[in-house]
Structure formats: structure tokens, C-alpha cells
Amino acid sequence: MKIQEIHIYGFGHLNNVVIKDLSNFHAFFGENEAGKSTIMAFIHSILFGFPTKQSSELRYEPKNGSSYGGKLRIFFEQYGLVTIERVKGKAAGDVTISLEDGTIGDETLLKQLLGNMEKGLFQAIFSFNLHGLQNIHQMKGEDLGKFLFSTGTLGTETLAKTEVELQKELEARFKPSGKKPVVNEKLKVIHELSDDLKKAAAKNQEYEELNREKERLNNEIKYISNSLHEVKAEVDKFNEWQKINELVKEERWIRTEIDSLGESPFPARGVERLDKVNQLIYPYNAQISSLMERISLIKNEIAAIQPDKQILEEESQLLAALEQVPIYEQLTLEKQQCELKLVDLEEKISIINERLHLPLEEEEVLNINTNIYMKNQVEQVSRKKQKLIEVKQELEEKFREERVSLEELEAKVHFAETQAISPHERVKLEKEVSNENEKRKIEIELNAVQDKIEYYRYSNKQDTKINKQKKMQFLTIGAILLVLALYGLYTQQWVLAVMGVVGSILSGIFISKTLDRKNESEINKALSQLLEKEKKLIQLIDALENSNIPAIQEKLTQDNRVKEQVQLLKIKLEQQQSQYEKIIGKLKNLEIEEEENKEIILKLSSELSIPAYIANSFFFEAFQLIEQFKLVGREKKHVLARIENIKLEQANITEKLSTYSKKYLADQGSDLSQTAYLLRNKLKEEQGKLIKSDEKQGKLDDLEADLYQIKQEQVHLISERTKLLDEANVEEEEEFYQLGKKVEKKLKLIERLADINKQLQYSSLKEMEQERLLQIHNVDEQLNHYHGDIETLSSRLIEIQEQQASLNYQIQVLEEGGSYSELLHYYKQKKFELEEAAKEWSVYSLAQNILSQTVEKYKTVHLPRMLAKAEEYLSFLTNKQYQRIHLQKAGTGFLIERSDHTLFEANELSQATAEQVYVSIRLALATTLYEKYCFPIIIDDSFVNFDANRTKMVIELLKTLKFNQILFFTCHTHLLPYFQPENIQYLHKSNVEVI
């Protein structure tokens, strides 16, 4: 089952929304309130009906007055493409089902398509939302295991909730060691009341004796009442018998009479039927005699008006010949037209001959080959000749133009060459420009040398300044150290003195090295070399000084332009020369083609017998005239042939009519029209005779048919009379009538018997009772005896009832006189309350027991297959970290086995792992126990709490479900890359967009 299209007329805030081409793995993306939950609810409502107004589910009725409902287009493997439309109507809406074969159905067909799936079960198995995962987050302890087991059973936590609610209800009513439950409290009260009641009963021995006497009197009253009822019933029977006694005796007499008459075969209403048959037989004899006389008279009339059968047999041929008379006249007219046309054609041939002047006879011209191939050749050579003339004129014009252009280019080249500088002068100017370039290089080198000189001078100045500063610093340090050495010698602190001396020596050595002038001399040497080089470069620049360089460069540039122009003109000249030569070549080729085409024209004109002087100028026109000549000549032949055919057809018509005239007419006509008129009258006369003869024959046939029918009816009536006698098993009619009287008497007795039975059927006495009462001769005496028994029993009953009233009064006095009665009443009331509470407890206990048995059966029969698939899914989702799911030995929980074979209860898992277990069980439930229902799996942001890796794994798992379409609703953009772009439906608050 795959949903291919969603069309929402009006549902919630969605109006006139169409979503097409849903894939097997489709995503709906949109922000909050964009319509994701609305579309999910729409799918549920179309498939299973709108929620009722009493339901807690939202109905999503549109607020803007648009039509409520919509339709789904779903593909079923068995039925093909099915349209399910549901609109507002009765409580769940009016649904219409349309199959591909044109079948239209209602809810019954929809249930058949959905396999009688209910909405609650569909939402539990195939519709995911965040609610299930949130329940996992909120549960603690063993409740989590029960929740997962319930999910694996029904798809939701319903089983776990039901089990908990049943246990709460049982414990609220009874606990074995409890005090507060209702049953426990009532048991305690009953035990206390029972003890008090026993104590009160010990003080009321008289009360017990009175109760026993009361029981005895009740039994005696019951016996007397039964006896009195039996006697009264017997009296009623005798009274009833007195009413029906005479009827029963008459019924017995009638049965005896019927038996004495015996069984005789006789047809129903036999006498009546025999009289009727006899009345019908006698009139037929007179009818038969009248019909035979009329038949004889008509036969004589038919013999007197017999037509000529031969002319009637040849009617079609004769009519065909007569119909040829107008044709004969038309042929005469056509012959005259053909003769006129022949004169016109001969005139046309004469005109064409004058234009052609061919030295040929008419038949020779008609034999000239002018087929389509020859015509095509003539057209081609004529068109080619004309085209060659046009091309030649065009080429000659181009030849003149190209020759003028060539002469102009040659003049331009010569003029440009005279404007160029001579090669010797150009070499001289280029040398001067080269010296200028050398000067620029020297200037650049001079600038570099001057920069180095400046740098060395600055460096020498800085080194001198730094050396002075260092010298002052070390002299100061050396003086301090020398003072320190003198102080050590003076105070005889030898270590201090040695340190001062060594420091002074080191300071002196460093100062001598710092003041080394070697580096300074190298700098001065390099500086002097650079100054010398600067001087030489300045002298070279002065030697190359020339102020006319810009004019020379301008002159050289101008000469370059002239040379480029000359070169360009020469290229154009070469191209023009080539173009000129090509045109000359084309003219030569054209002359060759003209000569070849002329030869073809002469060859074709020879075949067509056209003179050369005509062919050279008017070849195609001459060919057309020959074609016209042949066309007119053929038409002339056709006209001549038609005139001959007309003569033959007229002779044939005349011959046919002449033959029929000689055969059927006494007087011959003077011309063809008169002959035809006489033949037509003769035919009409014979046809009139035939019509009259046919009418008489029809009447004759009708009379003969009537005669046959009457005879057949007479025979049938006679056979009916014979049949009646045979059924009564008699030979004479007199015997038949006597037997009929006997049967009539028997029927009257049977009717009387039926009337008696109708009266007896309302009697309360059965047949056996009637037989018994028939044996009693003195009914009145027996009735008097029964009336005496009734009086005796009634007197005894009144006496006992008086004793019972007195006894009841004594018991009432005892009960009202002490606390026993109140205690007994209170005891019975509490006992009744206990029984009612126990019944309620039994109902819940029985429900818990049935639930436990159902769960146990599910665990042993269905759950293993589902758990195997759930283990496969869990192993995939956790990268084989968790591999097995075990049932608890007791209870309804699960144990999860890790890859290292460690077992965890559900509450010991992390929240994320518990969610993965939940997803595995839900998917396994849909693909195993409910695998025959290939419904779409609808998921509403159920994996938002997963990290990136878990999300990727669960999406890959969903993609493996090949038999279930996946519809994924989300508001999170990080999930979209898992779907193909064309399989993402973008939902906005105002509309639905497909990207």
C-alpha cells in the first residue's frame, strides 16, 4: 500500500492543498504550526473516519467555511490505484471508494481494502510520534521494562497501563493481610455481627419452634393449593366437554360415513367440465360445413384470372430493357455532343501544327516519347540553359569589378612604397636610437652607484658615533674596576683586588678590539671605488648626449606604419589577384557547361524531332506544344471511340425491345417509344391479374387455416371428454354422472368435517382427553363429586391460613420485642454488601487472569519471531553493541544483552539506548506480526533526541523497509540531507511547496 497523492479540500487551516508524487521514503518539512500534525490527522481521518464530537481527538473542522474533508490516491497491489474520498456527512463522514475498474464502494469496501484494521491499532503500530519516547524519559525502575513489553505487544503502553490499573483496582478492594481495602473491612464487620447474632439466637428458642411450625403450615398450604388447583382444572375440563360433546360425536359419525363411501377416482369438478365440453362440441359441425362451401367458391374464382406467368418470370429483364429507352435518348444527345467536340479538337490540332511546323504526320507526332522522364530532362536542360545565361552575366559583371579593384590596389602599393625610408637611412636612425637606450641603462646604473655611495657614507658616520659611545662605557667600567683593585690592595682583600685587576685588563683588551680601524678602512676603500665608477658613468652619459632622439623615434615609427600599410596592401593585392583568377576560371568552366548543355539539347531535340533552330531558342515551349498536340490527339481518338460505342449501345437496346415486342405483343409499334409503351401496359395488366390472384389465394389460405383450426379444436374437445371418462374409470356418460353425485356427497361431508374441526381447534381439550371423556356416560354426577371436593379443600385452606396468621403475629411480636430482629436485618445487609464487593473483586481478578494468560500465550507463540527481528534492528542501530533481547522469566519485562554477554534490565540502560530498543521493537512489530498489512509508517519527529550517528543509523534502518512507505514529518533542517531533494515536501503556514 502506497499513498501517491493527498488532496485536502478543507482540514484545519489547510484549504485546497494537493500533494502529488509521494515517494517510498518521503519527508514533510515545516516549522511549528505549518501543518505537519494536521496532514497526519488528515491521513488517519480519511482512512478511518473523522473523530466524533464526543471524542477527545481534534476534528480539525475548517474555520473559513470551506468544504470539510478530502481524498487520498493509494496504490494497492491487488486493486491497483484506488481513490478514497471522505467529506462531511454522518458522524465519521461520507466515504466514496473508486477502483481502477470503475467499481464504486463505501465503508464496507474500505474495510476490505484496509483488512478490517482499526484506527487505534493503526496509530499504535504504524504511526510514530514523540509521545512514546517521552514516556521512556518519564519512567523509572521496572515500569520501563513493562512499557517496552507492552510496546512489543500492542505498539503502545496500553498493556502496561492496563496491568497496573487492574492491580490497583484489586488492591483497593482486597489484600490478604490488609485492613483498609473494602472487602477486608466488610469481612471484619461480618465476623463481628455473626458472633452477636449467635448470642441473640441462643436467647430465642421459642422463635425457632415458631419458625418450624410456620414452615409446616406453609407446606400444608402448598399441598392443599395444588390439590385444589387440580380439582378445579378437572372441573374446567368437564365444563368444556359439555360444550363440545355434540360436535365431537358428529365428527366421529362423519368420519365413519366418509370411510363407508370409500375412495373413487373422479376428476375435480368433473360433471361441470363434461357439460361444458358437450356444449362446445355441437356448434363446430355447422362451422366446418360453411367454411368448405366458401373454399370451393374461391378456388373457382382463382382459376378464372390466371396471369401470363412467362412475362412475369421475365419481368426484371423486361423492365431493365424498358429502362434503357431514356438511356437511348441520352446516347443520341451525347453522340451529337461528341460530333461537335470532334470538330473543335480538329481545329486545335490545326492551330498547334501551324505553331510547330513539324514535318510529321499526326500519328507520328502521337508516337513521340514525351514521358515524365523525357519531360524532366527537357525541363532540366532548359532551366540549366537559363541559369547558365544568368550566371554568365553575373560573372562578367564581377570580372569587370574585380579588374578595376586590382588596378586600384596596384596603384596604392606603388604609392606607399615611395613613402617609405630607404634601408641605409633607416639603419643609421636605428643606431642613434640604440645609443639613447644605452644612455638610459647607464643612467640607471649611475643611480644605483650613487645610492651605494650614500649608504656607505651614512654607515661610516654611524659606526664612528657608536665606537665613541662604547669607548666611554668601557673606560668608565675599567676605572671602576681599577678603583676596586686599589681598594682591595689597600684593605688587603686579595680576592677583590684580583677581580679588579682582571676586570681592568679585560676592559682594556675589549677597548683595543673595538677601536680596531680595519673595518673602517675596508668601507673607505669600497667608497672610493664607487666614486671612481660614478665619475666614469657621468662621462659616458655626456658622450651619448643627443637632443634629436624623439624626432628620430617619431620618424622610425612613421616608417613602420608605412611598411605595415605596404604589407597589408600587398596581402590585399594577392587576395584580389586570387579572386580575379577565380572569376576567370569560373568563366571558363561556364563556357564548358554551356557547350555540354547545348549538346544535350541537340540530342533531346533530335529524339523529339524538333529542328535545331527551334531547340536553341524555344526548346521547352516546343516540347509543351508537342504535349498539347498529343493530348488533343488522344482526346480526338477517345471521342471517335465513344461515338462508335454509342452506336453499338443504341443497336443493342433496339434489338432487345424488338425481341420482346414480337414475343408478347400482337400489334407492333411504329417506333421505339411506342413499342416500349405497349410492352409496359402489357406488363401492368399481367401484374394486376397476379395481385388479384394472390389476394384470392390469401383468402383461400385463411379459410383453409380456419377450417383446420376448427377441426383441431373439435378433436381436442372430443379427447377432453374421453379423458374425463377415463379419469372416472367409466365408459358411459350416465355412469359418469352417477359417480359424480356420490363424490359430491363425500365432498359436502368433508366440508362439514372441516367446519367442525375449526370449532374444535379452539377447545382446550386434547384428543386424548376427548377420548377419555367419551367413555364417561354420567358427566353431571362426576361434576357434583368434584364440586364437593373443592368445598372441602377450600374450608381446610381457610382454617390453615388462620393458623398461619396467628403464628406470624407471634413471630413478629418476638422479632419486634428484642434486638435480634434488628441485628439479623443489619447482618443480612452487610452480607449483601460483602457479596457485591466480592463480585467486583472477582471481575477484576478474572480480567487480570485473562490478561496474564493472553500475555503468556503471546510470549510463547508470537513474541519470539518479533524479538528476533527486533534484535536484528537493535544490533544494527547500536553497531552490534547490544545484540539480544530476552524475556523476563517472570513478569512482562525484557533483559537486554550486550556484546560482552552482560544482561541489563530496561531501567539500567541509558535513555538513548532505551529509545533505540523502543524503536527496534516498534519496527519489528510492524514488519513481523503485522507484515500482511503493508501500511505506510508515519513518523512525527520521533528521533530529535538522537545524536548524529544514531540518527544516521535509524534513517538507514528505515530505508531497508522495502514493503512499507515511510512518511517522515520534521521541523529540523539537519534531518533533510538524509532525503533526496525531490522527495522533500516543504510546508509553510500558508501553503505547501514542493522543492
Image: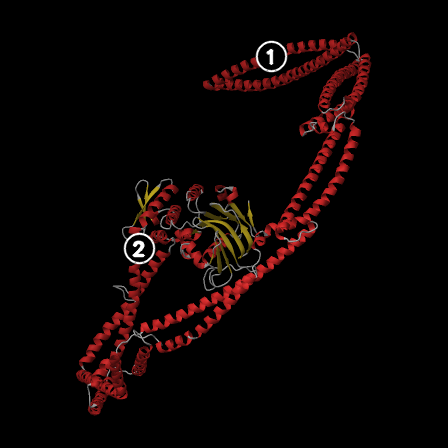
Taking depth in this image into account, of 810 and 103 the one nearest to the observer is 103
In the picture provided, is 535 more to the left or to the right than 494? right
| Residue bearing mark 2 | 855
Say what secondary structure mark 2 lies in.
helix
| Mark before the other along the chain sequence, 1 or 2 | 1
| Relative image position of residue 183 (x, y in whole percent) | 28, 68
Q: Can you identify the residue that label 1 sits on? A: 519
Instruction: State how far apart marks 1 and 2 are (Cα).
Output: 107 Å
Please identify the quarter of the rendering in which residue 793 is found.
Answer: bottom left
Of residue 467 and residue 301, the one placed in the foreground of this image is 301
Tell me the mark number nearer the camera, choosing from 1 and 2: 2
Count neighbours of disc 1 (C-alpha within 10 A) and say few if under 14, some if 14 to 19, many if 20 or more.
few
**Residue 369 placement (x, y as % from top left):** 69, 27
Quarter the C terminus occupies: top right
Residue name at image x 41 percent, y 57 percent? 118
**Is residue 241 found left or right of 437 in the rendered image?**
left
- Image location (x, y in percent) of residue 950: 42, 43
- Judge the density around disc 2: few (<14), some (14-19), many (≥20) Cα neighbours within 10 Å: some
Name, please, the residue furthest toward the front: 666
Q: Is residue 303 above or below residue 890?
A: below
Amino acid type shown at disc 2: Val
- Camera-side residue of 104 and 930: 104
Q: Position of residue 568 (x, y in %)?
A: 75, 17
Q: Where is residue 223, by image quadrant?
A: bottom left
Q: Secondary structure at mark 1?
A: helix
At label 1, which amino acid type do we have?
Asn
How many numbered discs sit on the rendered protein?
2
Res. 376 mark: none
Does residue 57 lie above or below 647 as drawn? below
